[in-house]
Amino acid sequence: MQFQLNFAELQGTKQQYDNVGAHAEVMKMMNRGDRLTVRFGAKDDVPYAWVESRLVSGFKYELDNERFTNLLHYLFTGEVNLYNGDPNHSERLDEGQDYQMDVMKQFIEAGMVLQYTPLFREFNERISAMKAMPKGTIYFRIPRTNENLEYLREQNQPI
């Protein structure tokens, strides 16, 4: 048997991420009442949440403002809101924008205190924090820079 692969052709094809499937899975998880574990990030300037539960392994869920708000609403209240937009359309971030840090700042500036891993236990160059809510937990891992440490101290966060 002889066969030949065209690797240049295979490597040149880039498929669009199936965010419709990811959205459907998040909705199933929320309708079931799962406790979600969420981490925020961005890839190619597209914000996403890495979502997982006890029953479903983690996957990327690209966000727009409404999907982000609906996800947080579920985490805080357990209520599921309908989404009327197109799950394949995600808002783009400004180049170099740190989406995870922006979300973390929104929590802090809303007066919420996050739970931090003590800095002496962190051997890498990250600051780890979490916020537990009735229907899940959000985890943050931001760069351990002087700027970030100053910001957290100015906001009276217990780092």
Image (cartoon, helix red, strand yellow):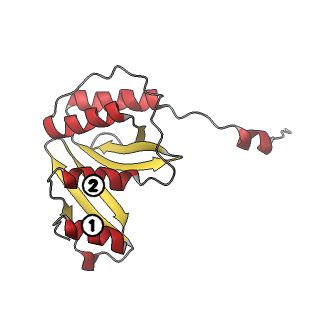
**Quadrant occupied by the N terminus:** top right
Q: Residues within 10 Å of mark 1 (few under 14, many from 20)?
A: few
Residue 123, compared with residue 40, is above or below; it is: below
Give residue 33's position: percent from left, percent from top: 19, 32
Give residue 110's position: percent from left, percent from top: 17, 50
Instruction: Kindly identify the residue that appears in the image at 17 percent across and 51 percent down.
Output: 132
Q: Nearer the viewer, residue 149 or 54?
A: 149
Instruction: Kindly identify the residue that appears in the image at 83 percent across and 39 percent down.
Output: 3
Tell me the amino acid under the disc marked 2.
Answer: Lys
Give residue 69's position: percent from left, percent from top: 27, 35
State the CA–CA distance, disc 1 to disc 2.
Answer: 9 Å
- Residue hosting label 2: 105
Q: What is the tally of numbered marks visible in this picture?
A: 2
Tell me the amino acid under the disc marked 1.
Answer: Tyr
Q: Residues within 10 Å of mark 2 (few under 14, many from 20)?
A: some
* Residue positioned most to the top: 84
Q: Secondary structure at mark 2?
A: helix
Look at the numbered discs 1 and 2 and tell me whether their residues touch, using CB distance below 8 Å: yes
Could one spot residue 154 in this view of the protein?
yes
When asked about the image quadrant of residue 119, the answer is: bottom left
Left-right relation of 55 to 110: right
Residue 153, compared with residue 110, is above or below; it is: below
- Residue hosting label 1: 151
